[in-house]
Amino acid sequence: MIESLVENQVDFFKTQQTKDVKFRKQALVRLKKEIIAFEDEICNALFKDFKKPKFESLATETQFVLSELQYVLNNIAIWSKPQRTSSNLVNFPSTSHIYSEPYGTVLIISPWNYPFLLSMSPLIGAIAAGNTAVVKPSELTPNTSKVIAKIIANTFRKEYVTVVEGGVAVSQELLKQKWNYIFFTGSSRVGKIVYKSAAEHLTPVTLELSGKNPCIVDSSAKVKLAAKRIVWGKFLNAGQTCIASDYVLVHKKVKDKLISELQHNISKAFGKDIAHSKDFARIATIEHYQRLKEMLEGENILFGGDSNDEDRFIGPTLIDSPGDKSKVMEDEIFGPILPIISYETEGDIEKYISSYGKPLGLYIFSTNKSFQKKIINRYSFGGGVINDTVMQITNKSIPFGGVGNSGIGGYHGKYSFDLFSHKKSILKRGNWLDVPLRYPPYNIPINWVKKMKHLF
């Protein structure tokens, strides 16, 4: 079934219909209408899957996608035009252009933490660039997966864009097929499997992974505001955000004040009885819930630590100074648990950050411009924010993506269009002049040839 599905997409791409910009725009307009029509159903599905608050479902899933869609619709005509660039002297007379052409058939594998956003956002880029696409939503958020399948079925012909639902076996079967591009969002462990499968066919990939994202609070930081923004970014989606702060490195001078403000802002945001707050999501899967519970064992809990097995609830939790070999520091947390670690010197900061791979995000709270610059230049990471968290993802004018073990490639806005487009270079030569110097027999003195670099 999957093999024939891919073959049908290959055949449809060969009809050249998707290369028509008008065709792409019409498809995106239909998708926009369907998302608007299904918005309440999407929010209900997200709540059924892991009690995601409606505000978060709208702000971080549906409205985010609709904003991206409209931005692409407004600009796709310009992006799709051949871009003229300069030619060099050796090719005089000539003109040079860069053509954006679609790769062909695209596979998009999306995760469970932002199941609607992370299915639709790359799909928008794939369609805008003129590709066909197969979307594989996460089986761990089944209600949202069903709505995505319904929206796609209502919007597109199956041979153009379709959804394939199922578990690990389905993903494995999809990865056996020959694709022209693969876009994967998820864990580094699975990302390696995807990368290996893509290598069999020399298929280009984008891997949106994650990592242990540090949040640095220096002694010059506006601590009250920093705490408010850290709490929001960390406990959004119950901490199940790939760019959330994984741990805080705070200067010892302001550590106590920061902890106090973090506690205050958690209580202010979610109330005293957080388990009954309508503004706090649940852990998406029982396996992930159990993993997070184990992280809390034997730790010095400053705040929170409450859990409920039946509801997959783990409340916002602050941990004081976990050891290097603590479970909470072994790998990415990906949940509502925040270790607080003090530092004195920049060497202390380096000790922690260099202990892990390159993170997807890094955050600095500081009013010291020299310190900000030093941290940005010193460490390699996907992207970050100064004096806030998470908000880098909202700017369509900058690419979002990782580096090293946190991912390959960046997207959003025009970067999504470029990601799913092969840049085909065309040099057009004039016929009215043909300088004979390059043709044999080579009678030019060698010392002249050595001066020809200025022509290239």
Image (tube, rainbow, N blue to C red):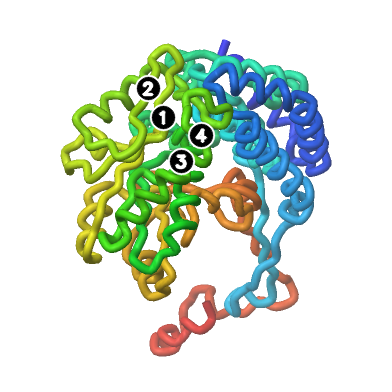
Are the residues flagged by discs 1 and 4 in contact, CB closer than 8 Å?
Answer: no
Label 4's element? loop
> Would you name the residue on which mark 3 appears?
266
| Residue assigned mark 1 | 315
47 up-or-down from 125: above or below: above
Q: Are marks 2 and 1 in contact (CB under 8 Å)?
A: yes
Of helix, strand and loop, which one carries label 3? helix
- Asked whether residue 63 is in view, the answer is yes
Distance between the alpha carbons at the discs numbered 3 and 1: 10 Å
Q: Which residue is mark 2?
A: 307
Amino acid marked by disc 3: Ile
Tell me the quarter of the picture where residue 92 sits.
bottom right
Amino acid type shown at disc 1: Gly
Q: Earlier in the sequence, mark 2 or mark 4?
A: 4
Graded by Cα atoms within 10 Å as few (under 14), some (14 to 19) or many (20 or more), the crowding at tag 4 reads some
Indicate the amino acid at tag 4: Gly
**Other-residue count near label 3 (Cα within 10 Å), few / some / many at <14 / 14–19 / ≥20:** many
Q: Relative to 90, is 264 on the left or the right? A: left
Nearer the N terminus, badge 2 or badge 3? Answer: 3
**Viewer-nearest of labels 2 and 4?**
4
- Horizontal and vertical percent for residue 43? 66, 25
Marks 2 and 3 sit apart, C-alpha to C-alpha, by 16 Å
CA distance for labels 3 and 4: 8 Å
Mark 2–mark 4 distance (CA, rounded to whole Å): 16 Å
